[in-house]
């Protein structure tokens, strides 16, 4: 027994003797929230950058999901262990922009002014640029993986149901839904109620989602869900579709709603542009289309959707040499070549005009028409609302939306009551966030 | 307390020092931080801090979701503890009594214990998914089971996943407990008491009380805390927040939603709840256990 | 009831129990030997397929991470080190502190027990940010020590050994004292051998607990060298299809081996000789 004890103690000591690894000169640490295929695309970009120059070395690290990475990086920041650049998603934009005044985030435009060489603000597509900018339009985050919600259509099912044209509006969808149902398929599915049929409903129809001009002019105190008749009408329609079997609700999980589409049981699925890379080669014959809108609500005009996905944010507390290297990296990541590579591989939008031009010049969209929808939809013009929303505690507000959407769709409460409850829940969370500003 | 004890000033501290050191540094320091957070308003990065009294507590507890999570957690703890303990005990007693194939049964019943809660969740997900799920279609055919819509069906889903995960753990500890009961006691009792059933409840079970008491606490903390990984990979609180436990809610608010103050307040409320439960157990249950 | 009939009943109950525990994992295993298309179109499988070698080879040798040096095997090693460290350290320190609490007469025994016991009330998930700060202040980010120590601060084992020591007959200590044993000798020569079954059970418990950690390694490690299997499941291998089943099965092997190996200790019936 004594021997076992000694062996155990020796082993424990051994484990304790491992020390942290030492650091190499100008390493640029980049934490991102991509996994699987998307992660390997990021790694490929890093390898290309590292092979191209030897001033700096980019070290990307996947930190799990978007939610995990935000918490991981904040914990690291509070302990002074933060990376140079971090990827933060749309719902976290308010938190990041608010941190400029505390000196956590180094605004991209400031870094560009100090260290930029080829920086050209006007090259960034405004809809994308403004989502991660402050209320004066100053770029805070670097647009990178920009997605939006899109409509995927299974062409084989449409053919089987005798549908010749993909609907552009919800009115057109209503015209063909019964036909698809009669052919034995689910007409429509949707994967993210807070994002697609809430946030993007507002942008797609040029409506304000919160007071304070979506939070761009003043700290928002309430969401405008129940106060927006168009929005209530939309959800009453959704409920009606569900009862008629035109829309099927599979709970709140993204994958559960996507699965029937992948299995070839549903005609349309509303999802993300980034879903493309995972479905290519798995679903036989699908097309990628703009998200529909109610033509009766916009007077027939199509407005852009909000940008989804995430941006890269530069963090403070690093040296001038590091920022100079970072700026070169940021410029590299937005070169047309890299943007096009990323666009092609991932399905995310190209964030600059020059990348889109390059794509057109080489006939990219003719060869791969899937990729066109995302850029087009984000580049639509004519909106009078800001290109984003600045509302704190948004991840929890999304939780409130999920819960109330479920209650509305299961018929437990009316649509109007559901959104009234959501507004009340959101107002509490907004007030809680406002206290910390 | 033991009737006979040592008293050696140096040795007693030497034995307790390593664990105390680890616990003070890696547990109490963070807990102190949690307490400060609970009474502070601050943003996720720790800026704009100011003392805000009980604001965070009021904010958390006035939330309808919180009360729902409270109710669910209580039901969840009772159901999991009862079923996983009973099944674990039943199997352990049988495995201890069986004459042939003893070691095979033990091995087959023990090893599923090794599976991570998150993995159990992911696995349960496959069994309960509308598309692929064997259990989903089985229950659906009997009473129209649909956890996407029905609260009670969602309860059943997480109860099964969480209980299944814990059966092996209870089995292991009950078995270890049974093994330590001296054969001679059991053999002696066989003469006095012929009925297996009565012998178990009058002789064996009382001797298992220290283990049972330990397991009840283990199961409560399991149901309270460790099921986070299961909820996060199964219903995520579906249908509409009814299957959120208190820990899951604090995790969503604090880790996902970055509301540190509210999460701190919720953590403290949880500590108090578990504290009350355990003190209650120590006073009313442990007093009745005969250790010798 | 005759002995034979009751034995049949025992077997029936045990077989039902075994099926309950084994069938779900069998289905995962069976599914892991099919190709992706079969799973997608027909769902999970009861019978074995013919893709066993292909799937498992891919999972074990596919390189992941940015350095392209991370494989499932290297993550398995990290997980093992972390779990082993946590289990050893916790069992050792708890065995010792429970000894103090039960066998020493001093005023602080009860307060110390409560100080240790109260830690049951705060799981790591709820104090993850402050814990990270402590670990980083000590310079332990990206080390095995940093992975192991905070998770070794567990009261469960102490509580468990306390329960057990209290059930050990007082006569044992009296006899040992008559033999002239001091507190060290009693601990090492009498109590520890007596606790073998309990040590095995607790080692399994803590090993599995450590092995299955997800959030802490994710927050703690930024260096891919330290990635563990369970966090890998949610990051690099997430987008896989059928390989995910193979990965689940592979990731279970180390803790399952520990469980199977250590459960032999239960069978030896250590108490008959005492």
Image (cartoon, coloured by chain):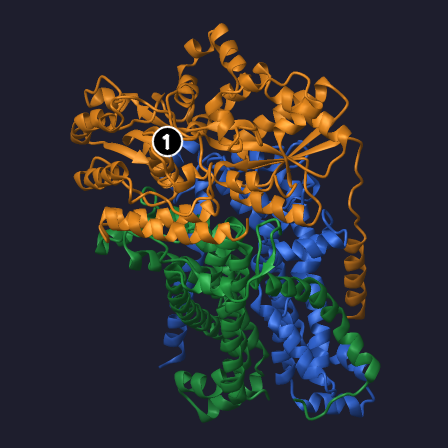
Chain colours: A orange, B green, C blue
Q: Nearer the viewer, residue A209 or B98?
A: A209
Query: Can you say which quadrant of the picture contains the N terminus of chain A?
Result: bottom right
Q: Nearer the viewer, residue A370 or C84?
A: A370
Q: Is residue A179 above or below residue B142?
A: above
Q: Is residue B18 above or below residue C141?
A: below
Q: Is residue C233 above or below residue B105?
A: above
Where does label 1 land, which residue? A203
Label 1's element? helix
Q: Quadrant of residue A170?
A: top left
Q: Nearer the viewer, residue A394 or B217?
A: A394
Q: Nearer the viewer, residue C157 or B62?
A: B62
Q: Is residue C106 visible?
A: yes
For this view, does A85 lie left or right of residue A38?
right
Instruction: Name the chain letter of the residue that bears numbered label 1.
Output: A
Q: Residues within 10 Å of mark 1 (few under 14, many from 20)?
A: many
Q: Is residue C184 visible?
A: no
Q: Quadrant of residue C74?
A: top right
For this view, does C120 lie left or right of residue C181?
left
Residue A202 is situated, as x and y percent measured from the top left of the image, at 34, 34
């Amino acid at each position: 027994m004594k021997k076992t004890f000694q062996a155990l103690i020796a082993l424990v000591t051994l484990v304790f003797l491992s020390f942290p690894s030492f650091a190499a000169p100008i390493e640029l640490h980049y934490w991102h929230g991509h996994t699987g295929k998307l992660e390997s695309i990021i790694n490929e970009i890093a390898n290309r950058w590292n092979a191209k120059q030897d001033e700096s070395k980019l070290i990307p690290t996947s930190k799990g999901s978007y939610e995990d990475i935000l918490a991981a990086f904040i914990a690291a920041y509070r302990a002074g262990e933060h990376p140079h650049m971090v990827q933060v998603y749309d719902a976290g934009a308010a938190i990041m922009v608010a941190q400029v005044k505390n000196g956590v985030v180094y605004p991209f435009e400031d870094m560009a002014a100090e260290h930029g060489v080829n920086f050209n603000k006007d090259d960034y597509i405004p809809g994308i640029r403004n989502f991660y900018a402050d209320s004066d339009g100053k770029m805070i985050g670097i647009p990178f993986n920009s997605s939006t919600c899109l409509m995927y259509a299974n062409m084989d099912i449409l053919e089987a149901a005798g549908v010749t044209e993909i609907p552009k509006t919800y009115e057109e969808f209503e015209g063909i839904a019964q036909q698809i149902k009669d052919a034995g398929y689910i007409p429509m599915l949707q994967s993210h109620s807070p994002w697609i049929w809430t946030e993007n409903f507002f942008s797609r129809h040029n409506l304000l989602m919160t007071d304070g001009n979506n939070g761009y002019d003043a700290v928002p105190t309430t969401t405008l869900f129940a106060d927006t008749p168009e929005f209530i009408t939309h959800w009453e329609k959704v409920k009606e579709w569900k009862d008629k079997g035109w829309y099927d609700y599979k709970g709140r999980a993204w994958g559960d709603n996507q699965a029937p589409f992948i299995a070839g049981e549903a005609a349309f699925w509303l999802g993300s542009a980034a879903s493309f890379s995972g479905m290519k080669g798995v679903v036989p014959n699908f097309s990628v289309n703009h998200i529909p809108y109610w033509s009766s609500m916009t007077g027939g005009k199509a407005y852009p959707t909000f940008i989804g996905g995430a941006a890269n944010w530069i963090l403070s507390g690093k040296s001038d040499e590091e920022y100079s290297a970072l700026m070169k990296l940021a410029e590299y990541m937005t070169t047309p070549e890299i943007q096009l590579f990323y666009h092609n591989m991932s399905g995310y939008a190209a964030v600059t005009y020059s990348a889109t031009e390059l794509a057109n010049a080489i006939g990219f969209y003719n060869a791969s028409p899937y990729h066109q929808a995302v850029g087009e939809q984000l580049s639509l013009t004519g909106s009078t609302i800001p290109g984003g929303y600045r509302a704190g505690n948004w991840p929890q507000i999304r939780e409130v939306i999920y819960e109330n959407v479920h209650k509305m769709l299961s018929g437990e409460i009316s649509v109007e009551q559901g959104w009234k409850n959501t507004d009340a829940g959101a107002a509490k969370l907004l007030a809680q966030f406002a206290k910390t500003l | 307390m033991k009737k006979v004890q040592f008293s050696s000033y140096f040795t007693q501290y030497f034995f307790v020092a390593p664990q105390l050191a680890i616990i003070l540094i890696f547990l109490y320091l963070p807990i102190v931080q949690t307490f400060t957070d609970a009474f502070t308003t601050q943003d996720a990065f720790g800026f704009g801090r100011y003392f805000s009294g009980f604001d965070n507590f009021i904010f958390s507890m006035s939330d309808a979701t919180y009360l729902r999570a409270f109710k669910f957690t209580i039901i969840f703890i009772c159901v999991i503890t009862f079923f996983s303990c009973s099944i674990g005990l039943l199997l352990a007693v049988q495995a201890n009594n069986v004459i042939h194939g003893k070691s095979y049964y033990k091995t087959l019943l023990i090893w599923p214990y090794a599976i991570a809660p998150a993995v159990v969740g992911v696995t349960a997900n496959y069994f309960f998914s509308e598309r692929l799920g064997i259990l989903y279609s089985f229950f659906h055919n009997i009473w129209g089971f649909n956890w996407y819509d029905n609260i009670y069906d969602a309860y059943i889903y997480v109860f099964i996943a969480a209980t299944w995960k814990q059966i092996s753990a209870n089995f292991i500890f009950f078995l270890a407990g049974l093994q330590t009961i001296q054969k001679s006691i059991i053999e002696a009792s066989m003469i006095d008491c012929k009925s297996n059933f009565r012998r178990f409840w009058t002789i064996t079970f009382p001797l298992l009380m220290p283990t049972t008491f330990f397991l009840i606490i283990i199961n409560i903390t399991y149901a309270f805390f460790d099921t986070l990984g299961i909820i996060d990979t199964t219903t995520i609180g579906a249908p509409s927040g009814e299957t959120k436990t208190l820990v899951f809610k604090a995790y969503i608010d604090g880790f996902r939603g970055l509301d540190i103050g509210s999460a701190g307040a919720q953590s403290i409320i949880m500590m108090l709840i578990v504290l009350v439960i355990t003190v209650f157990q120590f006073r009313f249950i442990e007093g009745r256990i005969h250790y010798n | 009831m005759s002995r034979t009939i009751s034995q049949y009943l025992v077997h029936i109950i045990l077989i039902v129990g075994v099926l309950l525990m084994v069938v779900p994992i069998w289905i995962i295993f069976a599914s892991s030997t099919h190709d992706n298309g079969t799973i997608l179109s027909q769902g999970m499988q009861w019978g074995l397929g013919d893709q066993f070698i292909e799937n498992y080879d891919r999972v074990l040798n596919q390189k992941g991470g940015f350095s392209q040096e991370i494989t499932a095997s290297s993550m398995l090693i990290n997980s093992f080190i972390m779990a082993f460290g946590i289990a050893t350290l916790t069992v050792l320190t708890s065995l010792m502190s429970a000894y103090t609490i039960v066998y020493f007469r001093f005023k602080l025994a009860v307060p110390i027990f409560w100080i240790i016991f109260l830690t049951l009330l705060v799981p790591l998930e709820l104090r993850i940010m402050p814990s990270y700060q402590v670990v980083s202040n000590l310079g332990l980010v990206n080390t095995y020590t940093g992975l192991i120590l905070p998770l070794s601060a567990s009261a469960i084992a102490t509580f468990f050994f306390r329960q057990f020591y209290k059930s050990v007959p007082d006569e044992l200590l009296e006899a040992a004292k008559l033999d002239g044993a001091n507190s060290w000798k009693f601990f090492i020569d009498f109590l520890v051998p007596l606790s073998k079954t309990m040590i095995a059970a607790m080692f399994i418990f803590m090993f599995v607990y450590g092995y299955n950690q997800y959030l802490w390694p994710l927050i703690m490690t930024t260096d891919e060298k330290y990635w563990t299997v369970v966090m890998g499941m949610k990051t690099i291998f997430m987008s896989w299809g059928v390989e995910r089943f193979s990965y689940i099965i592979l990731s279970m092997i180390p803790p399952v081996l520990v469980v199977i190996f250590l459960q032999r200790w239960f069978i030896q019936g250590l108490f008959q000789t005492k």
